[in-house]
Image (cartoon, rainbow, N blue to C red):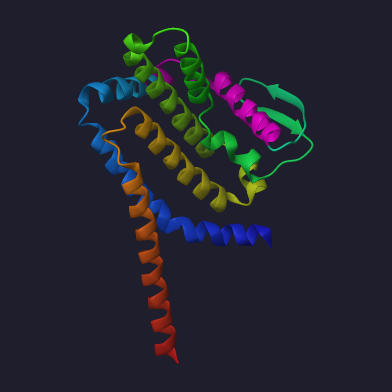
Amino acid sequence: MVRFLKFIIAVLLLPTLVLGAAELAGLLKSVLGAWRTSAFFFGGAVAYIFIHYKWYNFSRIYVFGHEMTHALAALLCGYRVHKISVKKDNGFVKMDKTNTFVVLAPYFVPFYTLVFALVYMGTSCFIELSPYSDYMLVAVGFLTAFHLIQTFQTLWETDQPDLKLAGGKIFSLVTITLVNGCVLACVLKILFPQEVLLKTAVLHVLQGTLNGWRIIVNYIVEQLINAV
């Protein structure tokens, strides 16, 4: 029953997913106006893509971050973590309980981006880091690309049991895609506060979702009435 309800939720979120993708594309386009800042951010992303496909794929590093995110999410929910195993291409976390957030967290929480942000903010309390802001943008772009590409590759190339455990592949993939879009939008808002109108984008998505479902429901009702 729970799995079926999650499937229904996923279906209801499909218009939101489509509209969110369109708004995210608009946000990405808008940041290009700040050409100098965006050049460093996207330069870092392109650098990661080149290294990943031409030199080294960082698989063990990704697995470590993936399993640590599982563990930290479990601790955040008050669960006990008994063991963490990290190998080159796979790993696992043994815990006494789990839930949807714990299971899916590694797929939408950019572990290394958050670690870097915390270190950067902590260091900035003691050292003036503004002269190094360009390098920070490169690092954030690099780590964001790392998260997105590794997540996509993991979901595309392997049959992840996490997806079934969280409530089914459709629910999990819709959730992962939607939340990753939200995370990327928030990253863009932090880096480009003037160019990214996040509130406006969110309102557009919400209004579009409501209007979309209003049209769908009206169409279904009309078809039922005509059938009678």
Q: Is residue 5 above or below residue 228?
A: above
Judge by depth and name the residue closer to the eye, 204 or 47: 204
Q: Is residue 73 magenta?
A: yes
The answer to which of 32 and 58 lies nearer the viewer is: 32
In which quadrant of the rendered image does the N terminus lie?
bottom right
Image quadrant of residue 99? top right
Residue for point 72% across, 24% down: 84
- Would you say 215 lies left or right of 65 here? left
The picture places residue 90, in percent across and down from the top left corner, at 64, 27
Chief secondary structure of the magenta portion: helix
Residue in the image at 45% along x and 32% along y: 148
The relative height of residue 128 versus residue 184 in the rendered view (above or below) is above
Question: Where does residue 31 sit, x and y in percent of width and height?
Answer: 26, 33
Magenta region, residue range: 50-76
Position of residue 32 measured from the top left corner of the image (x, y, whole percent): 23, 31
Q: Quadrant of the C terminus?
A: bottom left
- The residue sitting at 65% across, 34% down in the picture is 73
Query: Is the residue 37 above or below the residue 159 in the image?
Result: above
Q: Position of residue 163 (x, y in %)?
A: 61, 45
Work out which residue is located at the far top of the displayed protein and give it: 127
Quarter of the image for residue 75 reads top right
Task: Report if residue 165 lies within the magenta region.
Answer: no
Residue 137 drawn above or below residue 201: above
Kindly tell me whether residue 159 is visible in this rendering: no
Residue 207 in sight in this render: yes
